[in-house]
Amino acid sequence: MHVIEWVILIVVVAGAIIAVLGLDRYRNNKKTADIDARPTDEVFVEQDTGRRMRVWYNPETGEREYRPE
């Protein structure tokens, strides 16, 4: 094998290992965000399904999530 092929092989293998271990910084880890999310007093009914939904808010990220009640 030539040097270029070895370098490409090493980069691909290292990238696969990093992705499998979850060390890539671009992964959106919803488990962490769900831990700090808290239910609010806001409740509404979905027009399509008629289900009651509660708004959950994460103050650290500012994300609002809608979950069935």
Image: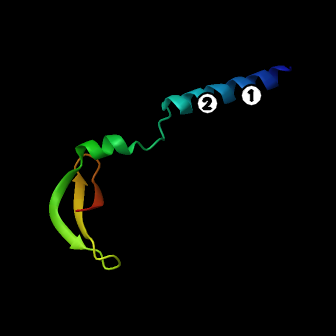
Q: x, y percentage for residue 35? A: 26, 42
Instruction: Give the camera-side residue of 5 and 54.
Output: 54
**Res 67 quadrant in image:** bottom left
Q: In this view, does 4 lie to the left or right of 39?
A: right
> Residue type at mark 2?
Gly
Rate crowding at label 1 as few (under 14), some (14 to 19) or many (20 or more) other CA atoms within 10 Å. few
- The residue lying at 58 percent from left, 27 percent from top is 17
Give the alpha-carbon distance from disc 1 to disc 2, as whole Å: 11 Å
Instruction: Give the camera-side residue of 50 and 56.
Output: 50
Q: Mark 1 points at which residue?
A: 8
**Res 49 quadrant in image:** bottom left
Which label sits on residue 29? none
- The residue lying at 22 percent from left, 49 percent from top is 59
Cβ–Cβ below 8 Å for labels 1 and 2? no
Q: x, y percentage for residue 53? A: 25, 66
Tell me the quarter of the image containing the N terminus. Answer: top right
Please name the colour scheme applied to the rendered image. rainbow
Rate crowding at label 2 as few (under 14), some (14 to 19) or many (20 or more) other CA atoms within 10 Å. few
Q: In this view, does 54 lie above or below 45?
A: above
- The residue lying at 16 percent from left, 59 percent from top is 40
Q: Secondary structure under badge 1?
A: helix
Q: Name the residue under label 2.
A: 15
Q: In this view, does 59 lie above or below 69?
A: above
Q: Residue furthest right?
A: 1
- The residue lying at 18 percent from left, 55 percent from top is 39
Q: x, y percentage for residue 60? A: 25, 45
Instruction: Give the camera-side residue of 66 and 9.
Output: 66
